[in-house]
Amino acid sequence: MRITFFGTSHGVPEANRKCSSSLIEAGGKKYLIDAGTNPIDDLVTMGLRPEAVAAVFITHLHGDHTDGLVHFADLLSWYYKEASPVFYVPKPGVPDALRPWLSLNGVALRDDLEFRVIREGVFYDDGVLRVTAFRTGHIDVSYAFLLEAEGKKALFTGDMKHETGPLDDYARFAESHVFDFAAAECAHFDAMLYEAPLREHPPKLFCFNHYSPRYEESCRHLARELDGTVPVIFATDGRMVDL
């Protein structure tokens, strides 16, 4: 499994860091997690076409995770007409929200684009990638995703509960799984809250993603505290991780 981070910033772009989006590659297939930035820009830069994407998984509907969907749906509707990823979204109504805006641009949302509503538990399994959704306390409907492919387990936390996410959300996910990789947010709380759950349930590799400058020093402090116990890396736009 290969993970390429397209956008790693928090709620707003930072210099050289766009809003949330990641590419997952496994078994010759490609998938996207979130579209806070338009992933087509990064796909084309990598020499990939949108037709290669099998599915798009959205953790929650905040703009820094979804604003790129508008551009994505626009281009799929009039230009990349052979691309047909299935969109997995937290709530119904996404295509109904896209249609009026695209119509202002003179574009009709393709009728054959499929949008499915995520349910907690295993919601996707194409024989290559299996995806399990865990509810988080970030907003009324928000999810973390466990990805399983090629014998590996990777967690994407999405956004978690404000102020106490590592204790209330991450710790619960980690109780029943040993992660080969965990991409964890740090935009809403001090990173040191991860210390106890990481020591109790250490992943093989822990990655700060979607982290805020406000908490970046606490992220680096945690990395120093865990040195020799849990490897810690920082996601940056364009970084690839092979599991």
Image (cartoon, rainbow, N blue to C red):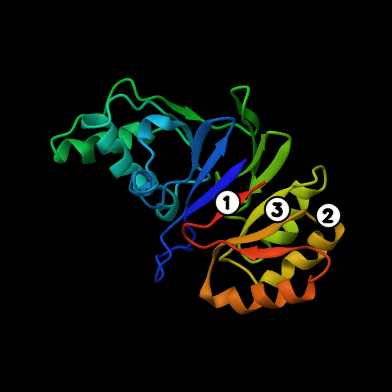
Q: Is residue 143 visible?
A: no
Q: Where does label 3 land, which residue?
A: 169
- Residue 99 x, y percent position in the rendering: 25, 34
- Above or below, 220 relative to 161: below
> Mark 3 or 1 closer to N-term?
1
Marks 3 and 1: which is nearer the front?
Answer: 1
Name the residue: 83% across, 54% down. Answer: 201
The one nearer the camera, 236 or 172, is 236
Marks 1 and 2: which is nearer the front?
Answer: 2
Q: Secondary structure at mark 1?
A: loop
Q: Which mark is residue 201?
A: 2
Q: Where does label 1 land, which residue?
A: 158
Q: Amino acid at mark 1?
A: Gly
Q: Amino acid at mark 3?
A: Asp
- Residue 127 x, y percent position in the rendering: 63, 22
Q: Secondary structure at mark 2?
A: loop
Name the residue: 57% across, 51% down. Answer: 158
Q: Amino acid at mark 2?
A: His
